[in-house]
């Protein structure tokens, strides 16, 4: 799939499906089940490496997982996360993003908004396809802070909307919205021409993403309300992934009780 195809989904009102993958076997299954986008998320810091947050993930980790996942994807668009501190300057961002593309990524994902304006500009002018990420930004979560819903008050909601419009004007191809009220996600999705992909952002985003280990029931501990364990209802991993695709396309995932 080409990055520009994501716009066609929005134009024809078809929801985009996205799951994370970190290894070849799961990536192949996800690709075979017709998931549109595979994300090599830096959530691998938690689900693969057992860390408390994503901040210790390195470029070396991302290059390794991007290469093995992209080698197993025939049809899905492959997005790779730029890890914490890998885009502290425009020069560093360009080199790191180009290396992720060489490893097989069709697009790179960067957390944050106006504070990285120069980085977004630099990547766009170097023809790197970019996915933005607003709302909850996991790279900002430290040992002493929490994963919590963003954009609940008027000023933070306005900032998310203005950052989204800014990133679109800077050339991003798609935008992940994480853990924000459904009403705000709907407003952002309506005002943007590019598609939004939500996680904990309600059913009105243009697509949905989940961490594969969460929706396969592998992650232990208390999970956020937006996670549905598809294996518990479907029985096997391929059936669970296919059910995720079916429910997202039909607009039945996430439900109201799985949203904020
Ligand atoms: O790293 C990741 O898995 C992500 C998703 C939560 C969108 O960024």
Image: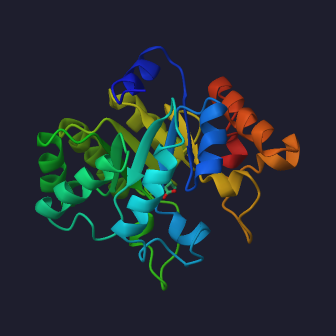
Left or right: 68, with 25 as reference point: left
Identify the residue at horizontal 61%, vertical 67% (top origin): 47
Quadrant of the snapshot with the N terminus: top left
Expressed as whole percent of the image width and height from the top left, the position of residue 85 reads 28, 71
Residue 248 position within the rendered picture, expressed as x and y whole percent measured from the top left = 64, 32
Q: Residue at x 38, y 59 (%)?
A: 63
Quick one: which residue is furthest to the bottom in this view?
144
* Residue 151 place in picture, x, y as percent: 43, 55
Q: Is residue 158 left or right of residue 213?
A: left
Residue 260 can be seen, yes or no: no
User: Image check: 248 left or right of 71?
Assistant: right
Residue 154 at least partly seen: yes
Vertical order, 27 against 17 (above or below):
below
Where is 247 relative to 136, above or below?
A: above
Which residue lies at the image location 54% right of the left edge and 33% below the top edge? 204
Give 172 or 240, whichever is nearer the viewer.
240
């Amino acid at each position: 799939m080409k990055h520009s195809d994501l716009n066609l989904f929005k134009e024809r009102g078809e929801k985009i499906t996205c799951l994370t993958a970190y290894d070849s076997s799961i990536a192949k299954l996800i690709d075979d089940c017709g998931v549109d986008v595979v994300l090599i998320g830096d959530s691998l810091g938690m689900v693969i490496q057992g860390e408390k947050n994503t901040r210790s993930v390195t470029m070396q980790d991302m290059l390794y997982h991007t290469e093995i996942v992209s080698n197993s994807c025939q049809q899905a668009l492959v997005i790779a996360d730029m890890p914490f501190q890998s885009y502290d300057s425009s020069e560093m961002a360009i080199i790191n993003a180009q290396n992720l593309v060489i490893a097989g990524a069709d697009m790179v994902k960067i957390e944050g908004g106006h504070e990285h304006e120069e980085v977004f500009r630099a990547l766009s002018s170097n023809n790197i396809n970019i996915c933005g990420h607003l709302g909850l930004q996991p790279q900002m979560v430290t040992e002493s802070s929490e994963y919590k819903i963003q954009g609940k008050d008027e000023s933070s909601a306005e900032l998310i909307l203005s950052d989204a419009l800014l990133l679109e004007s800077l050339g991003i191809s798609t935008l992940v919205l994480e853990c924000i009220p459904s009403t705000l996600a709907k407003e952002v999705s309506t005002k943007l021409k590019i598609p939004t992909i939500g996680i904990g952002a309600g059913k009105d985003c243009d697509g949905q993403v989940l961490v594969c280990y969460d929706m396969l029931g592998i992650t232990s501990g208390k999970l956020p309300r937006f996670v549905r364990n598809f294996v518990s209802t479907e029985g096997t991993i391929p059936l669970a992934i296919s059910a995720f695709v079916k429910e997202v396309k039909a607009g039945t995932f996430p439900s109201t009780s799985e949203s904020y």
